[in-house]
Amino acid sequence: MPRGHLGIALGDVEGHGFGSALVMALTRAYLRSFATMDIELDQILSQVNRMLAQDLEHGRFVTLALARLDIRRRSLTYAGARHMPGFVLQSSGQIDHVLESNGAPLGLFPESKFFCQKEVPLESGQIVVLLTDGITESTAPGRAEFGAHGALDYVAAHHAESAGQIAEGLHQAARKFAAYEPQNDDITSVILKINTDL
């Protein structure tokens, strides 16, 4: 992104299959185009939403978590389109910030409004967790769900591992919780570990 910022996006398309994959590819293309402009995250979401609202069939939509990491200032700005919340955790598992997605899903209403959350300062030892509902809605044979708490408990218990190891382990933990039943939804996570070298 402009000014040396790093953009982080995590999305989920309604439905499954080839058609949904095409919708996500289209969303990614629009997002990459607007992210090169020096505009705020809420404006990026508004522009992508207008384009998708013209392109998608009635009832198709995309949820999206969008963050901008300012490495120099050690801060994170966040906006969302009805995606599940993200979290900034201490290594103990205590939640320091909840990253809420208050906007409507993308592609439904061309004039939807989106809002940036207040900039979050990042401190050494914190972990940023962004998920899709494929993790939280992983379901055990008894119909219990892994849930956000299951995911955050896993992250806290493995906070000493690398971000890549946590992401892979979280995937495996969700699959194990579901007793390795056939996977009906995507399982995606973005894990950022804040350290003294940032």
Image: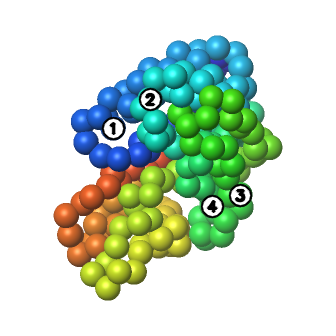
Q: Which percent across, then down, holds residue 85?
A: 60, 55
**Disc 3 residue type?**
His
Where 167 falls versus 114 (above or below)?
Answer: below
Please name which of the two marks, 1 or 3, marks the residue nearer to the observer: 1
C-alpha separation, residue under disc 1 versus residue under disc 3: 31 Å
**Left or right of residue 128, residue 162 in this image:** left
Please name which of the two marks, 4 or 1, marks the residue nearer to the observer: 1
Residue 180: numbered disc: none
**Left or right of residue 18, residue 53 in this image:** right
**Disc 1 residue type?**
Ser
- Rendered residue at 24%/36% (across/down): 18
* Residue under label 4: 89
Q: Earlier in the sequence, mark 2 or mark 4?
A: 2
Quadrant in which residue 8 is drawn: top right
Please name which of the two marks, 2 or 3, marks the residue nearer to the observer: 2
* Residue under label 1: 20
* SS assignment at label 3: strand
Q: Earlier in the sequence, mark 1 or mark 3?
A: 1
Q: Earlier in the sequence, mark 1 or mark 2?
A: 1
Residue 97: numbered disc: 3
C-alpha separation, residue under disc 1 versus residue under disc 2: 10 Å
C-alpha separation, residue under disc 2 versus residue under disc 4: 36 Å
**Disc 2 residue type?**
Leu
Where 78 falls versus 137 (above or below)?
Answer: above
* SS assignment at label 1: helix
C-alpha separation, residue under disc 4 versus residue under disc 1: 32 Å
**Disc 4 residue type?**
Leu
In the rendered image, the quadrant that contains the C terminus is top right
- Rendered residue at 46%/41% (across/down): 59
Question: Can you see residue 178?
Answer: yes
